[in-house]
Amino acid sequence: MTIFAPRGSLLVCLLVLSTFQTTHAQSARTAADQAPPIAELEAPVPGSLYVRMGGAHNVQAIAADMIDHVAKDPRTERPFEKVNLTRLKSLLAVKFCELTGGGCKYTGDSMHDVHAGLGINEAEFYGLVDVLRDSMRRHGIGLQERNEFLQILAPIKRDVVEH
């Protein structure tokens, strides 16, 4: 089993940051724009990472826990200052569900488009990844599943961090 270094696979943060919208953009959206609860969506792929992570309950809990923490952490709070955190938690849970084989379909904006112009730097990105790793641990996600999830999320970094 390979254990990924926190900075090498910490691109999970980008995924999280990519799902948020600014207050201005969100004010134009309606309640119908909210993602449905992931428990009401298609059945997960048997044996998928989604199932091994504990399904809808854990995926939603991890997304919510992570957002609650990054929005208050001095290392990561800046990009979340004008974000509808409730909406972000919902969209992020659906994105996590989709990426892990849970049968969900993420319909939000692309990671690149959502993060454009936010000036997210590597320190903020890696801070978010640290928070995500801690959140997965708090929710009983095993090392193999944590590493697998971080590996899935890693390519998102290029769409989130501005150089």
Image (cartoon, rainbow, N blue to C red):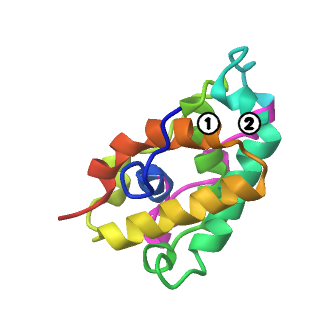
Q: Position of residue 48 (x, y in %)?
A: 66, 21
Q: Give the residue displayed 29% in from the left and 49% down from the top.
A: 159
Vertical order, 129 against 154 (above or below): below
Q: 52 left or right of 28? A: right
Q: Give the residue displayed 58% in from the left and 65% down from the top.
A: 131
Instruction: Give the secondary structure at mark 2.
Output: helix
The residue positioned farthest toward the left in the image shown: 163
**30 magenta-colored:** yes
Q: Give the residue displayed 40% in from the left and 64% down from the top.
A: 125
Work out whether residue 47 can be spotted: yes
How crowded is the residue under tag 1: few (<14 C-alpha within 10 Å), some, or many (20+)? some
The residue positioned farthest toward the bottom in the image shown: 74
Q: Amino acid at mark 1?
A: Gln
Q: Amino acid at mark 2?
A: Ile
Instruction: Give the secondary structure at mark 1.
Output: helix
Work out whether residue 26 can be spotted: no
Q: 142 left or right of 112? A: right
**The magenta stretch spans which residues?**
19-39
The residues tagged by marks 2 and 1 sit, at their Cα atoms, a distance apart of 23 Å
The front one of 94 and 65 is 65
